[in-house]
Amino acid sequence: MMLAAYRWATYLGAPLIRLYLSLRMARGKEDAERFGERLGRPGRPRPDGPLVWVHAASVGESLSMLPLIQRLLDERPGLHVLMTTGTVTSARLMAERLPEGAFHQYVPVDRLPYVRRFLDHWRPDLVLWAESEFWPNLVGEPAARGIPAILINGRVSPRSFAGWRRFEGSIRRLLSGFALCLGQTEADARRLVQLGAAGAKCLGNLKFAAPPLPADPAQLEELEKAVGERPLWLAASTHPGEEETAGRVHGQLLASHPGLLTVIVPRHPERGAGIAADLRASGLAVSLRSAGEAIMPATDIYVADTLGELGLFYRLAGVVFVGKSLVPLGGQNPLEAARLDCALIHGPHMTNFEDIARALVAGGAALVVDGEAGLAAALERLLGDEAERKRMAEAARALAAAENGILDSVMAELAPFLSGGQGHAGA
C-alpha cells in the first residue's frame, strides 16, 4: 500500500518535483547543461551490444565500483557499462575516472515517467546497484520488466534498519527486485535477510578492491618543494564544524611544532572559499588552492578545495584525520588514506565504515579521538614520533590489502548473470 501511494505521489507531484530540482539547480546542486538526464532524457545514444547499468549514489559509492567496472570490461569484450550517479561532483569525477567502454549519465529522479523513459532508451541487460539507495521506482521498474538486478556492497546501517522495520512489507517488496544481495559486511547481510532479501550473503567489502587514489607526479613534486621540511598534517574530506576545529588545533600545536602546516581538503569543494574566509577571520594565514594561491612560508592553513586530488594530499601527508567523523555523520572511507602510507586519526562517528574502522583501530593503524582536545593530543603524539607514525602507516597499508581477493569472489557471483544463464548480459 505504501509503495502504491508513493508512486501516485511522485506521479501527481511533477510540478513540486520540478520546483525542487529548479531550486537545487540555483544552488549549483544540479547540472544545467545535462538537466534532461534527471528527467530520464538520454544524453547520448545507446551503444550496440550488451549493456550493464551500474548505479551509485555519489562519490564514495561510485569510486568503490570502478574496479568492478574495469573487470567487467576486461573480461567481457563488447560489453558497455552505463554508470549513473546523482551528484554534480560525482559526475565530474566519473568523467575523469571511468575506463573506456563505460560512460556516465545522471540517474533520473525517482518518478515513474522519468524512470520508464530512461529504461526505454537504455534497455540494460543487467543492473548492479551499489550500497543502499532503495528508490521504489528505480528498483521496482527493472524488476517489472524482467531485468535482473544485483545489490553490490549492500549496506544497511542500524538506524536505516530500524526505520525500514516500520515498513516491513514495503522493504520486502523492494528487496525482492534483487536477484542477489551481496552485503558489505556480515552484519549488513544479516540485516538484509531480516528485511526480506532472498539469498543475501557477504563476500567482503568491495571498498578493499579499490586501487590507490591517483596523483599527478608533477603536482606532488611542486607541493613537496613548497612544504620543504615543515611538519604537516591533513584533515581530509571534512564537513562543517571540522574545519574550525582543525584551525583551533593548528594554533594549539604551533608552539611545539614551529612551522606547522595544516592542509584541509573539504568533502565539498564549493565550500572552500567560505572555509578560507572563516579561518582568516580567526587570525590564521590561509592559502586557497582553487584561487591559485601558493603555500608560502607564512601559510598556516592550505585549503585544497579542488576535485579529485585527494590522492595527491594523502601522498604529501604522513598523518591524516579522516573527516565526517567528529560530527555525527558516519565518517568517510579510511582505506583511501590507509593505502597511501598514512597514520590515521578519526572521530567517534564512523558508522558508515564501522567494521573497517574497528579493524584499523584493533590493528594499531588508527587512533580514535572524541573532540578537539583528543585530536590535538593525537597529532602531538604522531607529529613528534616518526617511528610510531611509520609503524601505524605500515599497519594501515597491510590491513587495506587484506581482502584483495574480494573482486574475484564478486565476479564469480556475477558470472551466471553475465553468461546469459540467469540474465541477458552475455557477450
Image: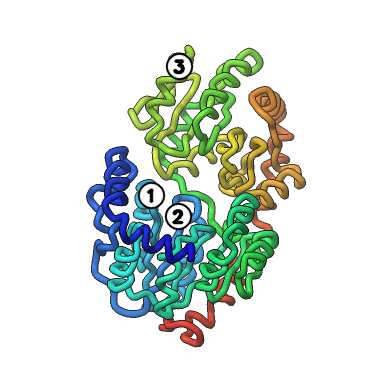
Q: Is 188 drawn above or below residue 381 in the view shown?
A: below
Q: Position of residue 344 (x, y in %)?
A: 65, 39
Calculate the distance from the C-alpha at mark 3 to the C-alpha at mark 2.
Answer: 36 Å
Amino acid type for the residue under numbered disc 1: Thr
Q: Is residue 419 left or right of residue 337?
A: left
- Sequence-earlier tag: 3 or 2: 2
Task: Name which residue lies at 24% across and 47% down.
Answer: 32
Q: Between tags 3 and 1, which lies in front?
A: 1
Q: Residue at x 37, y 79 (%)?
A: 50
Q: Secondary structure at mark 2?
A: loop
**Residues packed near mark 2 inside 10 Å, few (<14), some (14 to 19) or many (20 plus):** some
Q: Nearer the viewer, residue 284 or 42?
A: 42
Q: Identity of the amino acid at label 2?
A: Ala
Q: Which mark is residue 285?
A: 3
> Which residue is identified by label 1?
87
> Of helix, strand and loop, which one carries label 1?
loop
Nearer-the-camera pick, 222 or 187: 187
Could you tell whether 27 is left or right of 167 in the image?
left
Report the amino acid beneath label 3: Ala
First-in-chain label (3 vs 1): 1
